[in-house]
Amino acid sequence: MATVVYKVGNDISTDVIYPGRFMATVLPSETPLLAFADDAAFNAKLKAKQIPPGSVLLGGQNFGCGSSREQAVSCLKGHELIIVAKSFARIFLQNAINLGLRVVTCPNIEANVGDELEISATAVTNKSSGKEFFLVSLPKSRQAIIDAGGLIPFTRKRLLEGAQTTR
């Protein structure tokens, strides 16, 4: 079960998620401090670790549009948030897969801050309203990368498995 802790609308750009003025800060250990920096209240909760890992950030359509900045994903991954959105911008989605950010595409999702969501392989159930919404699954190969923690851990695991089979 995951709680919706923040809700945004449609066309949330990477500049809202990770403002461009912070582009000099790129270390994954530092970018989480700047997530949603222009929303002082939410940013303060993230910095103070008042948002538990596995909480849901709920987005509308075209979440992560705009620039291709990877920091918009790394800052969210640093807080171990689950992003449930009606749709994702193409480059944001690929960056999320590459970095292992848990993303769920759920075109008809209806939820509010405080709602409890149960996320399965095929649906998101809003336990607060009792409604179920089908999700759009990622291809298995892309989901495997997220499940491994990103492209680098996925590749490392595959290489190690390959090395063990050749011995």
Image: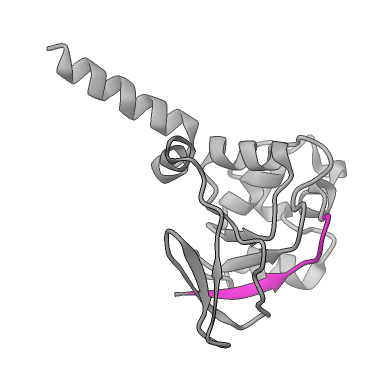
The location of residue 14, given as percent across then percent down, is 79, 47
- Furthest toward the bottom, the residue is 129
- Name which residue lies at 46% across and 43% down: 143
- Say if 60 sits above or below 22 in the image: below
- Main secondary structure of the magenta stretch: strand
- Say if 91 sits above or below 166 in the image: below
How many badges with numbers are in the image?
A: 0
- 32 or 90, nearer to the observer: 90
Q: Quadrant of the N terminus?
A: bottom left
- Name which residue lies at 82% across and 66% down: 39
The location of residue 12, given as percent across then percent down, is 81, 55
Which portion, as a residue range, is magenta?
2-11
In reply to whether residue 76 is colored magenta, the answer given is no
Horizontal placement of 121 versus 5: left or right?
left
In reply to whether residue 3 is colored magenta, the answer given is yes
The location of residue 128, given as percent across then percent down, is 55, 87
- Furthest toward the top, the residue is 166
- Name which residue lies at 64% across and 42% down: 93
The location of residue 51, given as percent across then percent down, is 58, 71
- Furthest toward the left, the residue is 167
Q: Quadrant of the C terminus?
A: top left
- Say if 91 sits above or below 82 in the image: above
Residue 30 visible to the viewer? no
Horizontal placement of 127 versus 147: left or right?
right
- 33 or 64, nearer to the observer: 64
- 34 or 114, nearer to the observer: 114
Residue 54 visible to the viewer? yes
Q: How is the image coloured?
A: one colour
